[in-house]
Image (cartoon, rainbow, N blue to C red):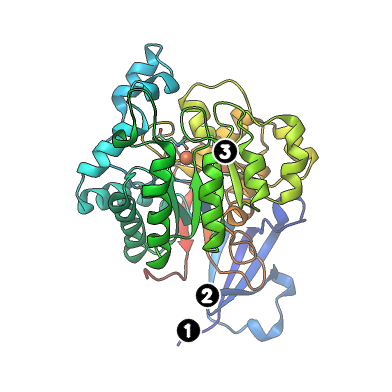
Amino acid sequence: MQTDFLYKDCTLATMEQGANNYGLIENAAFVVSAGRILWRGKMNELPAEYTKLESESLEGRLVTPALIDCHTHLVFGGNRAQEFEQRLKGASYSEISKAGGGIVSTVNATRNASDEELLNGALKRLDALISEGVGVVEIKSGYGLSIEHELRMLRVARKLATLRPVKILTTWLAAHALPPEYAGKNANRFDDYIDDVVIPGLRQAASENLVDAVDGFCENIAFSCVQIERVFAEASALGLPIKLHAEQLSDQKGALLAAKYNGLSADHLEYLAEDDVPTFAKSGAVAVMLPGAFYTLNESKQPPIESFRLHAVDMAVATDCNPGSSPISSILTAMNMACTQFSMTPEEALAGSTRCAAKALGLQNEYGEVKVGAHAELAVWDAAHPAELSYWIGASLLQKRISHQEPS
Ligand code: NIG
Ligand code: FE
């Protein structure tokens, strides 16, 4: 039987909605009961009924909610180091993609990899995230591009949750690129691919409980808004929430489409027009910032951060871990990049990988804040102030995670 437990002597960054200055509580303590926060506050305000509980001193360390990586492509075969070399010699991401490389080269490698190879590759990246205090990870399909291989990716993602104490949410991203068998010399068969693979595969994934949300890549080198809308209509019919890779390389009005379908989030958004921010804000969707992709592709157009602030759009920060545009399995590095490249504050970056990331996954109230009733998924840091989490690069800051998640 699980008993209540008291953690004391810490600095809590609660990251609670509406609180100032990281929701910081110094000389803090908290009580965990059945895996949830029962009480948190100043040590000298600890109710008498909790003083006798079994306890542990955290020796003055900083405690935050466990971090959340709300946008990853963690499961894939091979890597694209050679494209990295090509880009350094001047080829652009779009040019490589149009020449048949890019996402499609990872599709070939993923189809050729065994389940075990996919699992072991993803485990390495997952362990890297966990070692930085991550407790929740979203993982997309999108490198299989056939029903068989897309479902295989999702099964591997689900399997990861049985091997590590981490919550994993899966996303159907079959509308990521056109597989070679649908690319024609004269005409690409996008609609046939959606009819044959994206929609029936999604139905099957839903029926096997393999999918938690639906995503697409809305871009001039990928799918149009009209094509993505067909996928979103099916997601809505199945009762699944949507999110979208939008406005990464050009303004396609994808964020407005995500807003129209009450999306959880729109992700990337470098090319989102300032004029569209108010409509996007009204939908309540989260803007997921992916500075790792911006950095890796050497982009220069920043997302409209100031406009997001002005219209109170929640901004999340994620790694976008993938072999092409963002070979990064460090959420702390993504937070640092959000500050240095997008001028986000360290507080916004931490909110971006906790409270706002939880919202981008539909997990608000349950994860991402240290508050009464939330899951007691926490990270204990060898740091005195939460700005340090965005400041250090490559440091081993995590002392330990406090987790009540069992591998499922
Ligand atoms: O989020 N933009 C589309 N999808 C990924 C890149 C995938 C890849 O290049 O393999 C992204 O950046
Ligand atoms: Fe992505």
Distance of label 2 from label 1 (alpha carbons): 9 Å
Q: Is residue 196 left or right of residue 58?
A: left
Residue type for callout 2? Gly
Distance of label 2 from label 3 (alpha carbons): 42 Å
In x, y percent, where is residue 199?
43, 52
From where the camera sits, is residue 269 visible? Answer: yes
Which residue is painted at 53% across and 60% down in the image? 240
**Residue 210 got which mark?**
none
Q: Quadrant of the N terminus?
A: bottom left
Work out whether residue 394 or residue 352 is closer to the camera in this orientation and state it: 352
Q: Nearer the viewer, mark 1 or mark 3?
A: 3
The 10 Å Cα crowd at callout 3, few under 14, some 14 to 19, many 20 or more, is many
Q: Are marks 1 and 3 in contact (CB under 8 Å)?
A: no
Q: Nearer the viewer, mark 2 or mark 3?
A: 3
Q: Are marks 2 and 1 in contact (CB under 8 Å)?
A: yes
**Which residue corresponds to mark 2?**
35
The tally of labels here is: 3
In x, y percent, where is residue 264?
61, 53
**Residue 225 got which mark?**
3
Residue type for callout 3? Cys
**Which residue corresponds to mark 1?**
2
Circle 1 SS class? loop
Q: Is residue 372 left or right of residue 238?
A: right
Work out whether residue 327 or residue 93 is closer to the camera in this orientation and state it: 93
In x, y percent, where is residue 254?
61, 38
Work out whether residue 235 or residue 54 is closer to the camera in this orientation and state it: 235
